Image: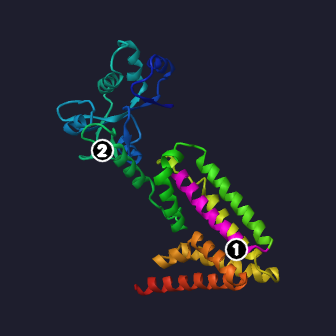
Amino acid sequence: MRAALISLPPPDGAAGQLVARLEPGDLLLVLAPGLVASPQLALAALGGGASILAAEAGEAQAAGFERIDADCGWAGIMVLPAAPVMQLGDLAPDIAPASALLRLGLQHAVPVRRLATGTIGTARWCIPGRSGGPDLTATERAYFDAALGHPPEVDASPLAARLAEAILRRRGHWLIPRADAPAALAGGALGAGALALGLAGWDQPAAAFALVALMAALAQLALVLARIGAAPASPGRAWAGLRLARDGVLVAACALVQPGPWYRAGFVACVLGAGLLLLDRADGRYARLVGDRLVLAGALALATLAIAPEPALMLAALAALGTVLVAGRSRITGT
C-alpha cells in the first residue's frame, strides 16, 4: 500500500496525472486549501484507515466546508482508497474536485467519522482569515502553544527551553519551514562544544564554560525544532545523541580545566556528572534549577573568573548532590 497527499484544488492537469499513477490499495490524503488542523486531533480522528472527517453541519458550514447531509458537514480532511479517486478522471474537467471527491467517497461507503463538537472553527482546526474564524495571529499563537510543550526527555535545561520558545515565537515562521535548521543548529552546538574542550585544555575555564552554555542553548533549540518537525505518529529519538554530547562535553570540560593529577580531576567531574543524572530524575523546582545545564555552565563561567576551577567545581558537585538528597527526603516524607 502506498500513500499520497493532494491539496485542493489541484493544479491544471494534476487530477488526470494523479489518477494515472494510482494503484489498487493506494490511499489518498485530501486536505482543503488553507486548512490548519492539529496533527494529533486529525490522526486520532482518522483512525489509521480510509475515512472522511465530519463535524456538526452548522459548524462545518460556518467554517466554509461543504455540507454532507442535514446533520453533518465535511471537516476539510479525508483519506480515500484508490477506487473512488480513479473515477475522478471520468468527470467533467471543470467540476469542483473537493465536492467530487467527497461525493465519490460517500458513494463508495468510506466511513464518516465525527469530530467533537466545538473543534471546527477554533485555532486548532480552521481556515485562518475566514469570516467568523480565528485570524492568522491567533492561529499561529495556538500552534506554538501546542507545539512548544516541554516533554521530560527534552527538558534537562528548562532555561534553555524557555529561551528556545522565545526565539521560536519570534522567528519560528522563518526557522520551522527550513528542513535543515535542526541539523545546522546541532552542528553549531557540536562546534561550540569542540571549541569549549579546546579552551578547557588551554587553561581558559571561563571561556570554555561560556561555550558550553552556548552549546546547551543551541542544542535545545535544535531539539525543539526537530520535535516540531517530527511526525506525531512516530516522533523518533534520532536526536537523543545531542543531549548526550552536551552532557559529555560539560563533564569533559570540568575534568580538563582542573590542574593536578588526572584521577583527582576526573573524580570531581564524574561526581558532578552523576549528580546531574540524579537531578534529572528528581522532582521539584530547585532540582530543575540546579540541574539546568545552561544555568550550571553559566554559573561556572562566572565562578571561574573569581576563584580557581577546582573549588568552583567542588561547590557545584556539592550543590547537585545536596539538592538530590533534599529532593529525595521531600519525596519520602511528602513535604
Q: Which residues are magenta?
A: 203-227
Question: In this view, which residue lies farthest toward the front?
Answer: 306
Three-letter residue code for mark 1: Ala
Q: Is residue 248 magenta?
A: no
Residue 11 visible in this rendered orientation of the protein: yes
Where residue 76 sits in the image (x, y, percent)? 33, 35
Q: Which mark is residue 238?
A: none
Front-most of residues 280 and 134: 134
Q: Residues within 10 Å of mark 1 (few under 14, many from 20)?
A: many
Q: Disc 1 to disc 2, how far (Cα)?
A: 49 Å
Q: Is residue 254 left or right of residue 56?
A: right
Q: Is residue 222 magenta?
A: yes
Q: Reading the chain from its start, which is encountered first: label 1 or label 2?
A: 2
The residue identified by callout 1 is 206
Front-most of residues 299 and 183: 299
Q: Is residue 152 left or right of residue 73?
A: right
Front-most of residues 138 and 255: 138
The residue identified by callout 2 is 134
What SS does tag 1 mark?
Answer: helix
Q: Main secondary structure of the magenta part?
A: helix
What SS does tag 2 mark?
Answer: loop
Question: In this view, which residue lies farthest toward the right?
Answer: 261
Front-most of residues 165 and 274: 165
